[in-house]
Amino acid sequence: MELKVRRVPIEEPEVLEIRCHKVTDDVQEIISFVKSRQGQISGQKDGQSIEVPVIDVFYAEAVDNRVFIYTAKDSFEVRLKIYELEEMMKGKSFLRVQKGLILNLMKVKSIKPALSGRYTALLKNGEEVVISRKYVADLKSTLKGGDSN
C-alpha cells in the first residue's frame, strides 16, 4: 500500500481519502484509528457499523480476543486490540485499570478501596469496575495530576 501526503492551501478543506480494492480488516483499522482521533470510534453491533463518540464511552474491555466499548446503555465490538485502543485514547482521560480494561475517568462517580489492595470505581451509569492492584499507583498518580502514560 502506497502512502501519499499532500499539503493544501488553508482555504481548501482537509480531506483524508483511502483508495483500496477491498475494505479489509487492515483498512478498517486505519478508518477506526482516524475516526477515533476525530472523537469517534467505529463499533459493530448486530452486523451494523456504528460511530460512537469517544465522549460516550465509559470503558473498553478485551474479552476472548475481542474488544468491546461500553456506553451508558450499550456495547459495541471494535476491530482493534486493547493496546491499540489505549494508545489512541492517550490524552483523552482514559486509563488502563486492568490487564484488559481501559476506563474513562470522566465517567467515574466515585472510587473506593476494595479487598486485597484493589479499588472499585462506581460509574455514572451505576456499573462498578474493579481497579487491579497493579494499576492503583497509576490511578493515584493520574488523579493527583501526574501523567501515567
Image: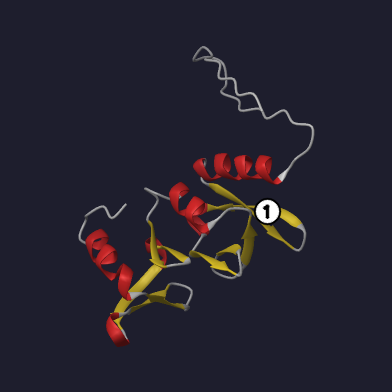
Query: Where residue 110 appears, x then y in whole percent?
Result: 33, 75
Displayed quadrant of residue 68 = bottom right
Q: Is residue 30 above or below residue 101?
A: above
Q: Nearer the viewer, residue 108 or 95?
A: 95
Q: Nearer the viewer, residue 10 or 135?
A: 135
For disc 1, the marked residue is 50
Q: Is residue 33 above or below residue 121?
A: above
Q: Is residue 5 above or below residue 34?
A: above
Q: Residue at x 54, y 14 (%)?
A: 8
Q: Residue at x 31, y 87 (%)?
A: 115
Which residue of the protein is positioned furthest toward the top in this rendering? 9
Left or right: residue 22 compared with residue 136: right
- Which of the colour schemes (rainbow, by chain, secondary structure, one colour) is used? secondary structure
Left or right: residue 57 compared with residue 3: left
Q: Amino acid at mark 1?
A: Ile
Query: Where residue 145 appears, x then y in whole percent?
Result: 21, 56
